Image (tube, rainbow, N blue to C red):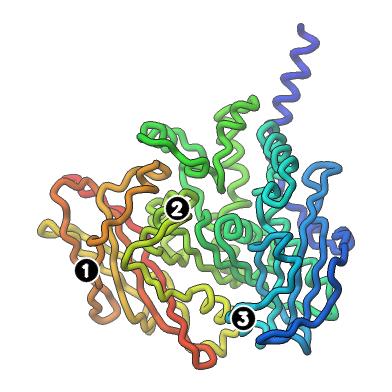
Amino acid sequence: MYKTTIPILLTIFCTFQSYGMNVFDMKEIRDPSTLQIKVLQDWHRVKGVIETRQKLVSINVGDIWPGQEYRVPVRMVVPANRKAKGFHLTGSSSPKRLENDTWPNPTERELIQGGVGLVITVVQEPGTYGQRKLSMESEQRFAKSLNPRFKIQYWAWPATLMRAITTAYSEKEHFEKGKVAASGGSKNGASPSMAIIHDDRMTAVHATVSPVWDSPLRLNDDKAWNELRDQPGRRSGFTGGHFGPNFNQRVLDAGGTWKDLQNFTRDISDQVFISRNLKALRKRGVDMLFHPGTHDFVAFDMAWGGNRHPTIPIYLGANTGHGKRGHPKTERDQQNKAAFMLKHFFPQKVEGALLEPPNIDSKVKNKALEVTVTFPNDSIEESGRIWWIFDRAPDGSPNYISQMIPDDQTMEMKKTGESWSATIPLSPTAKRIDFFSNHGKTLSYHKNAYKTYISSPYTRVSLNK
């Protein structure tokens, strides 16, 4: 009995301590000699509204565990008659779609005409393209070990984007080093948000419906989780997750403890969340803009983030998130991504500057909430609208996701000097109120207008007497 117990205990201890590692070996990530490139379509011209040259390859991102390589396709697109200087990077494709030549959309055509390339790869669940066994084994290995290298979400997807950069820059006859801006939604918003922390070749990220900050639920805080467990309804597999789908129960079923989960989320979060790396990212001059949604099951902690990270640039489409239609007054003319990319790559050619997050103040007076939003001088914001919701359910709960901002709980704001103001009538029974405002500004590039919006920090005020 004694001889068998000790090895088992040692195995469990070693397994659940293995997360104390750097997720990425950046020397490995940047090494083009290990890409094991397979040319699927060599450089060729592609005619269309704008002519380009394109190449499709398959690369080895690396081994998830010894002997198990992770391969993805990468399509590179450059101007027809010159090298690309930098590129727009995204994983929002699939192996099947990448088999066909890419037809750039209007914003991508502007980038290519300005000498910027495109690099497109695959950040998708492997099971969606015939590798379900790999996905399942990855999850099983991670649950038993809490080794982030084994989890596709933590290692393979961000590494895919970084290795795609290495691939493009190995094509020295077609790319020269420049800015690299990544964009995408959901897993394609989370992956570049994590990758940009580690890879200083990346210079901008525009991410939608994806995590931004490290709130208590994400860190398995006991008080936050006890409150969530008390909420009615069935939670999705995402709400309450650290950086995406919730893996807590699978780890517990595999022999881990709640303390193991707390240690893991605490120790890895510096390598995961934008909020923990703001100073370093801003020192690098990284441009950032996030669209987390107000009712998204991945971005389930808006009030926490708005309170603690009010300077992170965010646009909140009211009642938006995975599968949500949005509030009737949501800004349907919003062109943030296009303007963000054009301003990043061609700062001198875009007329106007994107709005920065404003300050927001409020006070209760005469059974109403008086809200004031103030921008820096010369911001030239053109509009202001405020939304609010009373007694919103706790973070991550089913009602937090399902109960929408009512159609009539919005109004235009009034501008006086550098400030926008609104007076919200308070419900006599409400215990708290959540609110935020959106403000618009028009930018111009090549005489084309681009409507942009920024939000004030999402704010929660207690109304208890």
Residue 292 at what x, y percent from top left?
Answer: 47, 59
Q: Disc 3 marks which residue?
A: 345
The answer to whether the residues at label 2 and label 3 have Cβ atoms under 8 Å apart is: no
| Image quarter hosting the N terminus | top right
Q: Nearer the viewer, mark 2 or mark 3?
A: 2
Q: Earlier in the sequence, mark 2 or mark 3?
A: 2
Helix, strand or loop at label 1? It is strand
Q: Disc 1 marks which residue?
A: 422
Report the label total: 3
Helix, strand or loop at label 2? It is loop
Q: Which amino acid type is shown beneath numbered disc 3?
A: Phe
Q: Disc 2 marks which residue?
A: 296
Question: Where, by quadrant of the figure, is residue 27 drawn?
Answer: bottom right
Q: Nearer the viewer, residue 462 or 103?
A: 103
Helix, strand or loop at label 3? It is helix
| Residue lying at 77% horizontally and 8% vertically, measured from the top left | 2
| Residue lying at 51% horizontally and 44% vertically, measured from the top left | 238
Question: Where, by quadrant of the figure, is residue 192 drawn?
Answer: bottom right
The image shows residue 444, relative to residue 155, as above or below, that is: below
Residue 228 at what x, y percent from top left?
Answer: 40, 36
The image shows residue 120, relative to residue 261, as above or below, that is: below
Between the residue at mark 2 and the residue at mark 3, the CA separation in whole angstroms equals 30 Å
Residue 423 at what x, y percent from top left?
Answer: 18, 65
Q: Residues within 10 Å of mark 2 (few under 14, many from 20)?
A: many
The image shows residue 58, relative to residue 171, as above or below, that is: above
Residue 33 at what x, y percent from top left?
Answer: 89, 62
Query: In screen coordinates, is 99 left or right of 456?
Result: right
Q: Which amino acid type is shown beneath numbered disc 1?
A: Ala
Between the residue at mark 3 and the residue at mark 1, the CA separation in whole angstroms equals 36 Å
